[in-house]
Image (cartoon, grey):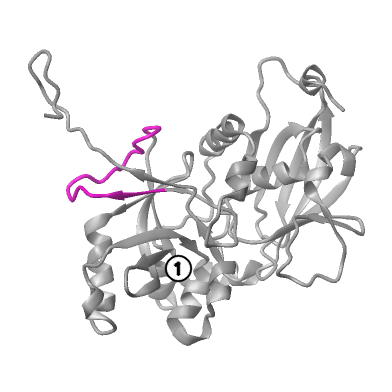
Amino acid sequence: MLTPADKKDAPIYQLKVTLTGSRPPIWRRIQISGETHLHKLHRILQIVMGWEDYHLHQFVVGERYYGTSQPDFDLEMEVKDERTVTLGGVAPAVGQKFTYEYDFGDSWEHEILVEKILKPAPGVRYPVCIKGKRACPPEDCGGIWGYESFLEAIRDPNQPEHEEMLEWIGESFDPEAFDLEAVNRELAALRSDGDEGEEERDRPRFGRLPPRYAFALNPYEDVRFSKCPQCYEPTRLRKFALLIYIERFGLLSQGKTCRCCPGCELLIVHQDELEAQLATGLWERAPEVIGNDYFVVGTVERKIWRRGLRQPQALSFEELRRHTADFKTILEIEYEPGGWYPSGRSNES
């Protein structure tokens, strides 16, 4: 077993990660300790590629499969625990390749190539992304072929699905965009947070997917939070499918454009806008529950949410659980406006 001192001297792997089938190629180059366990590598790949960790994943090394235990799925092959093996253990030499597959429905396969094995550089904290090209495809867009159809639709106003795809993505989408600084800020946050503790993993929750995001309702109509209230970096507008529990009604999934800080993994929703949407949606179905207390549970995978819109009765309770990620934590926002105040008196009075 490595001691802490040994870990500092562990070899650094330079990996090139390429999304299989992407043309032009979508790729990232990262440097990471060879002592990184595969479950941590999974989290790093989610960040550097730009995925949202909504789905199952696995590593395929030769004829061996590594992943997490999934008792709800009857898998024919033996899947070894990814927490028990390191990067250096599965790919000990330069030139070796293995596969990271994310989302067994869309089947996003990533080729991982060991380009170099280096000594740690003085003053550098790992993992770090050193280069990359092009944006990550949106979650749940149908795999590499679905992504190509999505790009055709948003580029051509004459395409039948043009408006639908723009509404679905919830923001402008640039397939050539890649923000190296933003990726490394998220990696720095991952280094600071460390692995999720046992207490957090064992906390009771509704969704079967790993908890994701901190969440806050913004009660201030005139405050936009274009900058994150935690790190002060610019937020982005992104559309999410939120799972909401309404008193005396039950669960409801609602598409909502949120302010999102990728570095802090924070979603902020305007309370007045959300409640107006809920009231509109419930007006014909259950007007008597409008105004009842509600609680935002987490996020639902968008393809499941869209299917529920088309076929409301087709989604079972258990299936909804399998495709929901609870929020890690619920935050309260207190806004303190700027201004001049007499000595000894704050603007909170």
Numbered marks: total:
1
Q: Looking at the picture, which amino acid does disc 1 mark? A: Ile
Report if residue 65 is visible in the image: yes
Q: Is residue 220 magenta?
A: yes
Residue shown at 84% from the left, 25% from the top: 2
Report if residue 101 is visible in the image: no
**Residue stretch rendered in magenta on the structure:** 215-232
| Side of 65 relative to 286 (left or right) | right
How far across and down, in percent of the image, does residue 83 sit? 78, 45
Please say if 90 is above or below 10.
below
Residue shown at 53% from the left, 33% from the top: 185
Q: Nearer the viewer, residue 142 or 297?
A: 297
Q: Quadrant of the N terminus?
A: top right
Please say if 239 is above or below 280.
above
Q: Quadrant of the C terminus?
A: top left
How far across and down, in percent of the image, does residue 291 sit? 21, 67
Residue reaching furthest to the left? 342
Residue shown at 36% from the left, 33% from the top: 232
User: Mark 1 Cα within 10 Å, few/some/many (few <14, many 20+)?
Assistant: some
Q: Residue 241 appears in which quarter of the rendering?
A: bottom left
Residue shown at 40% from the left, 67% from the top: 166
Prevailing SS of the magenta stretch: loop
The residue carrying mark 1 is 154
How far across and down, in percent of the image, does residue 231 sit? 40, 32
Q: Residue 72 appears in which quarter of the rendering?
A: bottom right
Q: Secondary structure at mark 1?
A: helix
How far across and down, in percent of the image, does residue 47 sit? 60, 45
Q: Is residue 117 magenta?
A: no
